[in-house]
Amino acid sequence: MKLNITWKIFIGMTLGIIVGYILNQYFAGDKETLAEWGKNLNLLSKIFLRMIKMIIGPLIFSILTVGIAKLGDFKLVGRIGLKTLGYFYFATILSLLTGLIAVNILKPGSQMQIPLPEAGADTGVASTKMTIENFIVHLFPQSFFESLATNEILQIVVFSVFFGIATAAIGDHGKIIIRGLDAVSEVMFKIVEYVMKFAPYGVFGAVAAVIAQQGLGILSGYLYLIICFFITLAFFILVVLPLICMFVKVPYWMLLRYVKDALFLSFSTASSEASMPLQIEQLKKFGVSERIVSFVLPLGYSFNLDGSMMYMTFATGFIAQTYGVDLSIGQQVTMMLTLLITSKGIAGVPRASLVVIAGTMSLFNLPAEGLILLFAVDWLLDMGRSATSVAGNAVATAVVAKWEGELKLAEN
């Protein structure tokens, strides 16, 4: 029996847990040896993620430029863009609200007895506040090649939109470029096929490295927080997203069946970007037109990270509860509205969620060292929020395709 990618990744993750646990027990107390093993095992994960990142820039540029050029109408691009951004902000509000309501109902910070970090302890995470001016300036690349080199998805998208419109505007000469970029996208998808064969090894390395260094015992003290957060994510995936699809008349469970491999890959690698090439292919098989997939999905990876949005309100509320700080309803609404703006375009920023949370905490005078409370289990929570973001982007793409009449469902 030939195993599909989901089973291979599952086996890789299971073996990673077993090997990581054995190493953690065998070298218990020897932090240096465990750190060395973790570093070596993590090489597999780093290689896989770097191979994925080398594909993303050229892939987005080629498929998005071709999609825009085939649209050939600036007004049409603008209309689809407005619908897409409108949905993204709607989904962001829902995810922020879900995290906020969940942390108030479940109260993980009040229920758990966790030793507080020392006052003034260094978190290693810079508390930066993203202003509207910085965000707008960041949208536009000063060099397209720099954007490709640093995988600035949002800037690649902006350049691709301009390039696609200009290509369509020059008529017959532009058709040569379109055919060339069509071929480039086919080559990129072929490379994706090769890279995905390494995915189970990357997953094995990532999981084994974390378990070897952290151990499974670290989870027991944080068990209630983990359960609460995953209940919140499950509610969003199993209730909120299906309701959106039901309202728009998109078959959600069928869609989930098509993107399940992408979800599982993102979960096991704790990276939503890792599954982007696979998700593009699966959404096209589901029935979304290529031009909608190529336009909406890349934008989603900067503007529509539902899992991360939930984590920001949930984690900030958790830290406030742990320190006994009672945030009023007005303060919580202010926090949500602030995050609605400052969280956009965070893709590609190392530990982006923690950076934004640190900035939000400073607004309400929460102790900066409180962020350390999340470090022990952030890797596990990141797995859940990455998969949730992938599910959210799949729904966003299908919804926009439905609105544009460009969703032709697969027959099976």
Image (tube, rainbow, N blue to C red):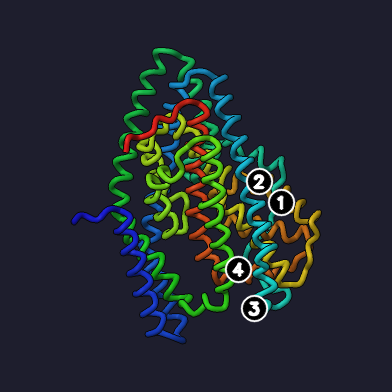
Q: How far apart are the alpha carbons under marks 2 and 4?
A: 23 Å
User: Which secondary structure lies at badge 1?
Assistant: helix
Query: What kind of element bears circle 2?
Result: helix
Nearer to me, 180 or 283: 283
Q: Residue at x 76, y 72 (%)?
A: 324
Under mark 2, the amino acid is Ile
Q: Earlier in the sequence, mark 4 or mark 3?
A: 3
Where does the image place residue 238, in percent across and percent down from the top left?
51, 52
Q: Earlier in the sequence, mark 1 or mark 3?
A: 3
**Residue type for callout 1:** Met
Residue located beneath label 2 in the image: 93
For disc 1, the marked residue is: 336
Tell me if I can see residue 146 in this picture: no
What amino acid type is highlighted by mark number 4? Leu
Depth check: give the residue in front, 360 or 62. Answer: 360
Question: Where, by quadrant of the figure, is residue 187 drawn?
Answer: top left
Instruction: Give residue 374's mark.
Output: 4
User: Few, some or many C-alpha atoms within 10 Å of disc 4 (few <14, some 14-19, many ≥20)?
Assistant: some
Mark 1 and mark 4: Cα distance apart in space: 20 Å
Identify the mark nearer the N-term, 2 or 1.
2
- How far across and down, in percent of the image, does residue 389 sit? 52, 50
2 and 4 marks in contact (CB < 8 Å): no
22 shown above or below 285: below
Amino acid type of the residue that numbered disc 3 sits on in the rendered structure? Ile
Q: Image check: 166 left or right of 98?
A: left
Tag on residue 114? 3
Q: Residue at x 72, y 69 (%)?
A: 321
Q: Kindly identify the residue that appears in the image at 62 percent across and 45 percent down.
A: 92
The residue sitting at the bottom extreme is 29
Mark 3 secondary-structure assignment = loop
